Image: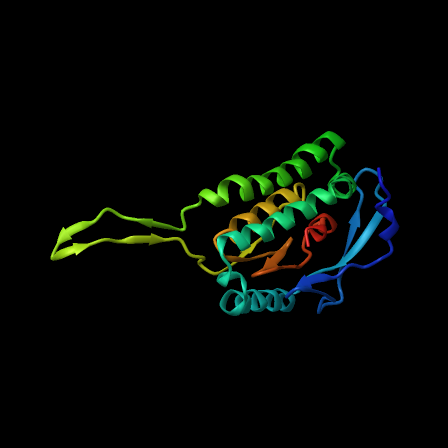
């Protein structure tokens, strides 16, 4: 197991609006290894103001950011870089899953880390190319001939709270689903984003989520 305790005395930050920032509050979350009860890190506890900052950034990106203007091919390229980033840090993510969530190594390697990475690549290689952003409805003959079109567009900023015992899988799944059609998401993992994620720590496993940035 690689050394994940080297950062145990360091306090993390919140990832909001594309950058790491200190939380507005004074409270922190102590990250404890459930197997050894050793402190392996601390992170700021996000406040309501932090969440509002993240949602505001997500909304601005939703309205004005570059992501909604990007083609499917460009979005797929971004998601592929994300998948490759996860794959490059697979060993570190496995060790963090073991240290933070108390996973066994087989569970961490397969479900905690391996499956989310596989899903990312599957999205880019199989699902996204075949995804129907627009679907034409059958023509309707009435007062002339008309035809409707179903257009799948992002609804807006979404707030999510992901479970501590599987920090990476649901978090990355939400990002994949919402980033694919152009939506932006906020999750308090709390994770938040629009064209990029902003993460606010609210769980016992923030460091694994932090690596997803």
- Which image quarter: residue 37? top right
Coordinates of residue 117 in the picture (x, y in percent): 64, 40
- Tell me, yes or no, if residue 167 can be seen here: no
Front one among 56 and 73: 73
Report the side of 114 relative to 186 (left or right).
right
Q: Residue furthest top?
A: 106
Q: Residue furthest front?
A: 73
Coordinates of residue 78 in the picture (x, y in percent): 60, 53
- Residue at horizontal 79%, vertical 41%? 99
Front one among 103 and 58: 58
- Which image quarter: residue 96? top right
204 shown above or below 19: above
- Residue at horizontal 66%, vertical 45%? 168
Coordinates of residue 10 in the picture (x, y in percent): 84, 57
Q: Residue furthest left?
A: 143
9 shown above or below 100: below
86 shown above or below 27: above
- Residue at horizontal 87%, vertical 55%? 9
- Tell me, yes or no, if residue 63 can be seen here: yes
Coordinates of residue 118 in the picture (x, y in percent): 62, 37
- Residue at horizontal 75%, vertical 63%? 27
Locate the N terminus and report the quarter of the image it occupies: top right
């Amino acid at each position: 197991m690689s050394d994940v305790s080297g950062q145990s005395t360091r306090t993390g930050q919140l990832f909001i609006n594309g950058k790491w920032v200190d939380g507005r509050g004074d409270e922190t979350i102590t990250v404890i290894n459930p197997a050894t009860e050793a402190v392996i890190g601390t992170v700021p506890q996000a406040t309501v103001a932090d969440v509002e900052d993240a949602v505001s950034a997500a909304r601005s990106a939703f309205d004005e950011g570059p992501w909604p203007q990007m083609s499917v091919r460009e979005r797929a390229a971004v998601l592929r870089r994300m998948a490759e980033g996860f794959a490059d840090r697979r060993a570190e993510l496995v060790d963090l899953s073991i240290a933070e969530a108390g996973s066994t190594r087989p569970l961490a390697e397969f479900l905690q880390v391996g499956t989310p990475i596989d899903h990312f690549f599957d999205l880019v290689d199989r699902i996204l190319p075949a995804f129907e952003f627009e679907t034409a409805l059958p023509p309707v003959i009435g007062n002339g001939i008309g035809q409707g079109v179903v257009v799948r567009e992002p609804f807006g900023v979404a707030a999510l709270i992901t479970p501590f015992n599987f920090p990476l899988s649901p978090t990355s799944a939400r990002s994949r689903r919402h980033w694919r059609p152009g939506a932006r998401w906020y999750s308090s993992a709390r994770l938040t984003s629009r064209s990029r994620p902003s993460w606010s720590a609210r769980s016992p496993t923030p460091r694994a989520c932090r690596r997803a940035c």
